[in-house]
Amino acid sequence: MTETPNPHIVDADTITGEMRPIRRVVIALGSNLGDRMASMQGAVTSLADTPDAWLTAVSPVYESQPVDSPDGSGPYLNAVVLLDTTLPAHRLLDRAMAIEQAYDRERIEGVPNAPRTLDVDLIVVGDRRSDTEALRLPHPRAAERAFVLQPWHDLEPDAVLPGAGPVASLLADTADQDGLVRRDDLVLEIP
């Protein structure tokens, strides 16, 4: 994955003088309930308004069939955003969950992949790795999901998913590409 800007450049907090590296972050967005585009645009706007984070790119929007979801689940809209940030991964996760909550995301205990108004998933945070209950980085299923890989590939054709390989190769090997449709009639705007 291309690190932009240079990962060896650090940002200094003007109050404390603390030095923090700037990391490239890949975030996947999805929605299959309510006004899907409004929720996703709200997520993009919220991410752009995040202190110490700079939204650099938004992918085209794709529509996909739900994967491993309850019967009757509707199709998803999906996109990927790239940001550069000095925030630690756990703060980004807190921000992602707050954005989901602002758009009425309900987590149904015992129902994996339940329909949702908004899903904001951290896919990659620089080269950070985490395998805790709260935070898994890189995202454990990203390598298998065309609805993550294709929009990411659109933004960074030479991207590499740490521990899994080049996004282009992973995309060629995914089985769920058939239900993925690029929606050029839908555009997410960077505020």
Image (cartoon, rainbow, N blue to C red):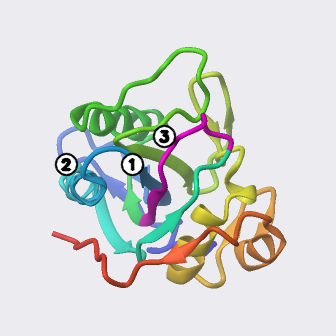
Any mark on residue 19, and which? 1
Outermost residue on the front side: it is 72
Answer whether labels 1 and 2 touch (C-beta < 8 Å).
no
At 29% from the left and 77% from the top, the residue drawn is 187
Query: Where residue 112 sits in the image (x, y, percent)?
Result: 61, 28
Query: Is 190 placed above or below 30 here?
Result: below
Q: Which residues are magenta?
A: 68-81
Amino acid marked by disc 2: Thr
At 38% from the left and 56% from the top, the residue drawn is 85
Q: Nearer the viewer, residue 152 or 83?
A: 152
Label whose residue precedes the other's in the sequence (1 or 3): 1
Query: Is 41 placed above or below 93 here?
Result: below
Any mark on residue 89, and which? 3
Q: Residues within 10 Å of mark 3 (few under 14, many from 20)?
A: many
At 58% from the left and 35% from the top, the residue drawn is 113
Reading the image, the residue beneath label 2 is 14
Amino acid marked by disc 1: Met
Relative to 61, 66 lies left or right: right
